[in-house]
Image: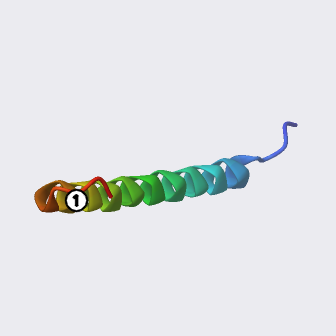
């Protein structure tokens, strides 16, 4: 009888979802910072 690994798969999907969400939030923060810098006319 094969082992029941469903719990590990669910945990992995939750972790990957959290990583993608964190990356999306990071990109949104970076985009806002770049837009503010462009409005001010500076490089940083």
Observer-nearest residue: 28 or 14? 28
- The color scheme shown is rainbow
Viewer-nearest residue: 33 or 38: 38
Residue placed most toward the observer, 41 or 32: 41
Left of 42 or right of it: where is 8? right
How far from the left and from the top, in percent, is residue 3? 84, 43
5 is higher (above) or lower (below) than 26: above
How far from the left and from the top, in percent, is residue 12?
A: 64, 51
**Residue farthest toward the right in the current orientation of the protein:** 1
Which residue is labeled 1 in the image? 37
Q: Number of marks in the image?
A: 1
* Residue under the point 78% across and 47% down: 4
Task: Pick the quarter of the image with the N terminus.
Answer: top right
| Residue found at x 84% / y 37% | 2
Q: In the rendered image, which quarter contains the C terminus?
A: bottom left
Compared across the picture, whether 14 is left or right of 35 comes to: right
Q: Answer with the quarter of the image where residue 26 lies.
A: bottom left
State the image coordinates of residue 30 (x, y, percent, origin top left).
34, 57
Dot 1: within a 10 Å radius of its alpha carbon, few (fewer than 14), some, or many (20 or more) residues? few
On the rendered structure, is 6 left or right of 1?
Answer: left
The structure residue drawn at horizontal position 43% and vertical position 57%, both measured from the top left corner, is 21
SS for dot 1: helix
Looking at the picture, tell me which residue is in the foreground, 19 or 41.
41
């Amino acid at each position: 009888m094969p082992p029941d690994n469903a719990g590990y798969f669910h945990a992995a999907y939750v972790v990957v979802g959290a990583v993608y969400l964190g990356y999306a939030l990071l990109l949104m923060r970076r985009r806002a910072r770049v837009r503010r810098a462009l409005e001010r006319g500076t490089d940083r």
